[in-house]
Amino acid sequence: MPAAKRELLSGWGHCPVDTCLSYRPEKHRDLGLILREHAGPLLPRGLGRSYGDAALQPEGVIRTERLDHFISFDARQGIVQAQAGVTLAELMDLSIPHGWLPPVIPGTRHVTLGGAFACNVHGKNHWREGEFAEHVAAIRLTTAGGDSVECSPQEHSELFWATAGGMGMTGIIEEVTLKLKPIASASLKTLSYRVESIEDMVAAFEHYRGSSDYMIGWIDHMARGDEIGRGVFEAANPMLAGDGGAALNKFRPLATRLSVPFFMPPFLLNRYSMALYNRWRFKRYSSERQSAVVDFNSFFHPLDAIGGWNRLYGRRGFFQYQCLLPETQDIAARLKSLLSAIQKHGGFSFLAVLKYHREGKGMLTFSKQGYSLALDFPNTRRVRKLLPQLDRWVAEHGGRVYLAKDALLAPELFRQMYPQAGDWCDFIRDLDPGGKFRSRMSDRLEWKPHD
């Protein structure tokens, strides 16, 4: 059996932090050995880019980053089969020069394919392409009993959809077969402009959803009163090389321009410094529509150019809180109420991003037709009291929080937010009656029986 060692681990938000017994298998047969020989609970873990406690299990984590080989790549049909430890970065570097792009791209390229499926990630084009699992043709999964099962939307479909967004509770994803999206260049054409209110922001999403492949809204949460929700709206579409897009062979892997080598002092990021930054960013844009040709790295993963950017929040870490509110006639007013409530509590999000979603698929899908709001908060006592209040408000308004970014949700609110939660919990308890696969999140949300 592979050797194990104890190490400090956390999610990307660096809170909480736990000492975990870690295995790093290099071959698939090691997975069976670990399952047979390890007496306590286990949890599969990719690169740890979920934010809260979803990838933490002090008694044993199986880190899959060394199971990182491509099995096959059909460059004519755009189908790739890879071990679960292959990263989105490695996939993009391979596929883009051949004219293929992952249909769903989250905010970081430093995520494994297994992790992307387990979290069922989404991107800036959800209303068009849905979530990651909707483009997966099949996965191979090692269950708690040691069986290796291939499942797909057609075969063992209940297991497939229970694993999509299941946060590692159904087993260890060994392989992923993904259908890619054809592209004609390595560029996007963007349209961006600043908006003066949340009403204007929602109107922009409504106007461009029919003509754009990607949309994103950055919100200046430091603005108050009638200006709350102001920010920058951006839409984008793929380009043809003949229209000015870069040739596919000109695509270059993302280079880290600078790194944050250590945890910054906690006073560096505060409401005053961030208010200045947000005002500067807002003023950079005009209310007139501006077009630009951008590369994939700049559009999809701007923060990945800064190595270790999460250290900017200091050693205490931060919470990224992402909630989704269903689309209603008064959705702008609801978003404004949420942003205002945070300010009244004395809180400010250092980063606020709005996206539009369609109805998702799967037992634990995050998405429904509506708007998601992602917010960054420093880890303070005030924020730890605020987030449970936001959870209740979101649940009362028919919304839900994204589990891959959650750290504090209560079990009763989880069941209120996710209508199929009861059926999903029953399914994974039948699949894994001994509770072999568990995490700090699963214990907190009472997904499985435990001692």
Image (spheres, rainbow, N blue to C red):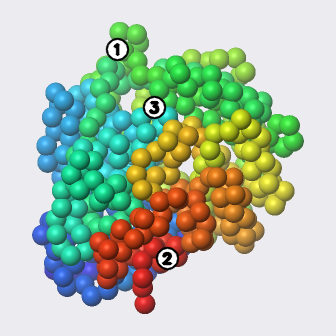
x 42%, y 31%: residue: 296
Seen in the picture, residue 191 relative to 60 is either above or below; the reply is above
**Can you give x and y, in whole percent of width and height, for residue 132 in the image?**
37, 45
**Can you give x and y, in whole percent of width and height, for residue 399 in the image?**
62, 52
x 25%, y 74%: residue: 144
Query: Which residue is under mark 1?
Result: 241
Query: Which residue is under mark 2?
Result: 446
Q: Amino acid at mark 3?
A: Arg
- Callout in the foreground (3, 1): 3
Q: Nearer the viewer, residue 257 or 121?
A: 121
x 43%, y 39%: residue: 130
Seen in the picture, residue 323 relative to 223 is either above or below; the reply is below
Q: Sequence order check: which comes first, mark 3 or mark 1?
A: 3
Query: Which residue is under mark 3?
Result: 128
Q: Could you say whether the residue bearing mark 3 is in a helix, strand or loop?
A: helix
**Which of the 4 image quarters holds residue 277?**
top right
On screen, residue 218 versus residue 101, left or right, reads right
Q: Sequence order check: which comes first, mark 1 or mark 2?
A: 1
Q: Amino acid at mark 2?
A: Glu
Q: Amino acid at mark 1?
A: Ala
Asked if residue 61 can be seen in this view, the reply is no
